[in-house]
Image (spheres, rainbow, N blue to C red):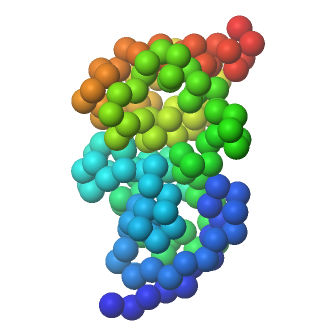
Amino acid sequence: MHQVHVSTKINGDEIEYLCETDETLLDVLRDKLGLTGAKEGCGSGDCGACSVMLDGRLVCSCLVLGAEAQDREVETIEGMADGENLHPLQSKFLEHAALQCGICTPGVLIATKALLEKNPDPTETEVRYWLAGNLCRCTGYDKIIRAVMDTAADMRGA
């Protein structure tokens, strides 16, 4: 197989790596860079467990090639907190017990962060629609939705 050299920015840091031309961004993040927050749930873009932001767009990293990150910006769950200070969504997920096994949680957090950046005042229906691509078998969705709605209100100062 042929390897390519990739220069990219991940969570604000300039990163370089070598990857096979058919290697997914998910595999690069997890296996080459040690960023194991994104999980492989399905490998076909149906579950959202591997969600990351690529140039400000929510994507399933199992459907993006590692080589496609060249000269782009990637944001993973590892970049969501500011050091020891959790992002408000992370805090609310803990407060509302909106997580259990942790497989879906990183993808759900990245997806909801993307939503609130795009729409800081979503309706419950909009949150449910936005998260339709993120599957969770442990918590159900009510605690997740409550955590997102509560975070949105707090971030707006409502």
**Lateral position of residue 137 relative to residue 110, left or right:** left
> Which of the 4 image quarters holds residue 91?
top right
Left or right: residue 47 versus residue 116 is left
The structure residue drawn at horizontal position 35% and vertical position 28%, both measured from the top left corner, is 100
Task: Examine the rendered structure and indicate whether residue 25 appears above or below residue 124.
Answer: below
The location of residue 150, given as percent across then percent down, is 57, 13
Question: Residue at 72% across / 17% down in the picture?
Answer: 156
Position of 65 with respect to 53 (left or right) is: left
Which residue does the image show at 37% across and 14% down from the upper left? 142
The structure residue drawn at horizontal position 70% and vertical position 20%, both measured from the top left corner, is: 155
Q: Position of residue 154 (x, y in %)?
A: 68, 15
Q: Would you say residue 77 is visible in this rendering?
A: yes
Query: Which quadrant holds the N terminus?
Result: bottom left
> Looking at the rendering, which quadrant does residue 64 occupy?
bottom left
Between 115 and 87, the residue placed more toward the observer is 87
Residue 111 seen in the figure: no
Depth check: give the residue in front, 130 or 100: 100
Which residue in the rendered view is the most extreme toward the front?
A: 84
